[in-house]
Image (tube, rainbow, N blue to C red):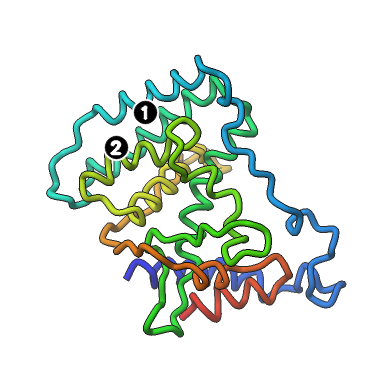
């Protein structure tokens, strides 16, 4: 149900742009070859932490403190407390990173969390009844140039087994994964946390109503998949123009 609700949202958001002229219409619908999106993604990661022992300890200390906070025993279920705890975890890690890495690296970390969740759900294909995928905690990690998961390049700097350079996975493994919380649920909740923390409270032009940070709805219960190589990434929209957007968000994910 979550998949369809999210795909419906994506369909509405993308179809609004599809009805207008294609932004690459002057090149036959194809993205110009000098467009920055087709250049190899810079795999920033948290490079400032390499060799920075004081910075590493500061981040590790924050993660340890968050892990030591007890979760409400939900028997492996995702409770409201779990969701709120993830938001606070992300907030504290981000605040700590602000003191030890560059603004660009911090942006890479926050943006990478949203990209991780997005690449997990954008492989949903309503036309494949046997293997529809969607938000299932599965990414094709064959991210080398020319490999099946090349479009996921850079995500390995967000989700890796290095406890110093990938605090998000360290947090998950130590606090949530061993408490029965699946990757798919965690990734979506973490992305929601980033969106909430990076959005601003705003007041309408008439200064009548004040709206809080964007707090997206959340439902738990996604089922993790362990292997999606050779299928997952090829369903993602490529960087070749409007046709790719239509393929993913309308033909695969739309109604």
**Residue at the spot 44% in from the left edge and 24% down from the top edge:** 59
Q: Residue 91 falls in which quadrant of the image?
A: top left
Helix or strand or loop: what does disc 2 sit on?
A: helix
Return the x and y of residue 43 as percentages of the image width and height: 64, 43
Name the residue carrying label 2: 174
Return the x and y of residue 66 as percentages of the image width and height: 31, 28
Q: Residues within 10 Å of mark 2 (few under 14, many from 20)?
A: some
Return the x and y of residue 190 as percentages of the image width and height: 40, 45
**Residue at the spot 53% in from the left edge and 52% down from the top edge:** 115
Return the x and y of residue 163 as percentages of the image width and height: 42, 33
Q: Which tag is nearer the camera, tag 2 or tag 1? A: 2
**Residue at the spot 68% in from the left edge and 59% down from the top edge:** 145
Name the residue carrying label 1: 63
Report whether residue 201 is seen.
no
Location of residue 67 with respect to 230 vertically, above or below: above
Report whether residue 216 is seen.
yes
């Amino acid at each position: 149900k979550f998949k369809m609700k999210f795909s419906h949202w994506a369909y509405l958001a993308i179809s609004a742009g599809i009805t207008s002229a294609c932004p690459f219409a002057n090149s036959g619908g194809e993205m110009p070859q000098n467009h920055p999106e087709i250049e190899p993604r810079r795999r920033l990661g948290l490079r400032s932490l390499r060799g920075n022992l004081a910075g590493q300890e500061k981040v590790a200390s924050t993660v340890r403190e968050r892990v030591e906070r007890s979760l409400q025993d939900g028997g492996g279920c995702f409770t409201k407390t779990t969701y709120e705890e993830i938001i606070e975890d992300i907030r504290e890690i981000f605040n700590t990173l602000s003191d030890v890495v560059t603004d660009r690296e911090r942006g890479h970390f926050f943006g990478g969390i949203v990209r991780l969740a997005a690449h997990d759900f954008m492989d949903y294909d309503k036309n494949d009844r046997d293997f529809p995928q969607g938000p299932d905690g599965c990414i094709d990690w064959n991210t080398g140039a020319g490999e099946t998961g090349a479009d996921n390049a850079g995500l390995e700097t967000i989700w890796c087994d290095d406890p110093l350079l990938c605090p998000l996975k360290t947090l998950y493994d130590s606090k949530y994964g061993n408490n029965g919380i699946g990757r798919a649920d965690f990734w979506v909740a973490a992305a929601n946390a980033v969106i909430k923390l990076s959005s601003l409270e705003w007041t309408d032009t008439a200064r009548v109503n004040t709206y809080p940070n964007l707090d997206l709805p959340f439902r738990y219960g996604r089922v993790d998949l362990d292997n999606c190589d050779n299928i997952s990434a090829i369903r993602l929209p490529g960087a070749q123009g409007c046709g790719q957007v239509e393929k993913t968000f309308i033909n695969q994910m739309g109604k």
